Amino acid sequence: MTQVRFNHMELTVPKGALDDELRADLAAFYGGVLGWQTMDVEIVGGTQFLMRPDEGQFVLVAESSKPMSSPGYDHLGLLCDTRAEVDELLEQCRRWQEKDDRLLLKTYDDLDTGNLVVHAFYVKYLLPIWFDVQCMEHRPGTGPDRVWRYVEATG
């Protein structure tokens, strides 16, 4: 059976919103806090903004006359390896929020389903969607049969 994984998501903002200031703010937060590579790209009929967690995944921010609206808790999940990584990112987001109240946070108690504990928080900054930053802690012997792992490329 063919296996697929996340490649990209396009998020649209109103026409004229993707100015130099927004691009700099996105680069500072998503690049600085989340460690994503950020860059301008010529695609979709203009200069858009690409944010890349790794070589195989990206979020494209593009302008549109019909921009995305997400008034609820629609979100894109970001997976960390450990609880400590989630906690460190939450702390960085809190520090960011102290200087910029445009950053929104929603914290949660751990979700414990018996075999799995999900440790997470939501963050929303300047884009029309929340990001769910989480780790999944499986009880011994209850994890998935297969998991994605990053390895150093060869050749």
Image (tube, helix red, strand yellow):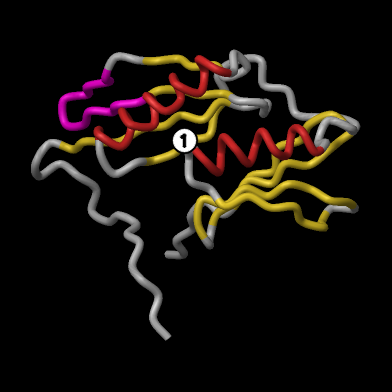
Q: x%, y% of residue 92? A: 42, 28
**Most foreground residue, 132 or 74:** 132
Mark 1: amino acid: Gly
Residue at disc 1, secondary structure: strand
Name the residue tied to disc 1. Answer: 77
| Residue at x-position 42% and y-position 32% | 133
Residue situated furthest front in the rendering: 99
> Would residue 119 be counted in the magenta stretch?
yes
In this image, 100 relative to 116: left or right?
A: right
Q: x%, y% of residue 83? A: 25, 33
Does 100 appear above or below 41?
Answer: above
Residue 70, picture quadrant:
top right
Does 138 appear above or below 150?
Answer: above
Residue 100, picture quadrant:
top right
Q: x%, y% of residue 37? A: 57, 52
| Residue at x-position 63% and y-position 41% | 27
In this image, 96 relative to 114: left or right?
A: right
**Most foreground residue, 103 or 3:** 103
> Would residue 123 be counted in the magenta stretch?
no
| Residue at x-position 24% and y-position 48% | 144
Figure quadrant of the C terminus: bottom left
Q: x%, y% of residue 99? A: 55, 17
**Most foreground residue, 86 or 44:** 86
Q: Main secondary structure of the magenta part?
A: strand
Give, as a single range, the part of the protein colored magenta. Answer: 110-120
